[in-house]
Image (cartoon, helix red, strand yellow):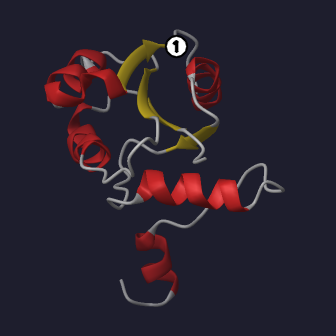
Amino acid sequence: MALSVTNVVCCYNSVPRLEPTLRHLSEQVVKSGLAWEVIVVDNGSSDNTAAYAKKIWPSSLSDHLRVVTEHKPGLAYARQRGFEEAKNEVVSFIDDDNWVCPEWINLVSDLMERRPDVGALGGFARRFLRKAAGMV
């Protein structure tokens, strides 16, 4: 059985960059029966990030989005809040300016299911790989 996935997006005044990030998450092609959610953690924003996230998220997927608030400033506190709020077995942290591929949720679930010995993993954003290869 596939492992369910929570995607946590920590935000601080994220209105200028949040739309494409949430669009990529809402356009996921998720295999049947795989539970998933997106949690937007508003970390004390003054630009209405929480309301904006709810506004731009597709209403047809409303049961996949939750917006929560963390009043203590700082990414560590925001991530901790997202982790505490997560309902699923796997937690994926996505920066508010990252665009994940359409298969992201399936890939995360499959990888963590195949490798139960792995507790955490990370990767490079494509722009950093391209920069390291001298392509930017």
Query: 4 left or right of 58?
Result: right
| Residue 45 placement (x, y as % from top left) | 36, 18
Query: Mark 1 belongs to which amino acid?
Result: Glu
Can residue 11 be seen? no
Query: 36 left or right of 90?
Result: left
Q: Which residue lies at the image location 67% right of the left edge and 54% below the top edge?
A: 113
80 to 126, vertically: above or below:
above
| Residue 78 placement (x, y as % from top left) | 56, 24
14 to 52, vertically: above or below:
below
Q: Which residue lies at the image location 43% right of the left edge and 32% below the top edge?
A: 37
| Residue 13 placement (x, y as % from top left) | 33, 27
On-image quarter of the C terminus: bottom left
Q: Which residue lies at the image location 78% right of the left edge and 54% below the top edge?
A: 116
Q: Dot 1, crowdedness within 10 Å: few (<14), some or many (≥20)?
A: many
Q: Which residue lies at the image location 60% right of the left edge and 44% below the top edge?
A: 3
Query: 61 left or right of 56?
Result: right
Tell me the SS state at disc 1: loop
For the residue pair 1 and 70, the one nearer the viewer reads as 1
| Residue 111 placement (x, y as % from top left) | 62, 61
91 to 30, vertically: above or below:
above
Instruction: Single out the residue that lies furthest toward the top.
Output: 71
32 to 59, vertically: above or below:
below
Residue under label 1 = 70
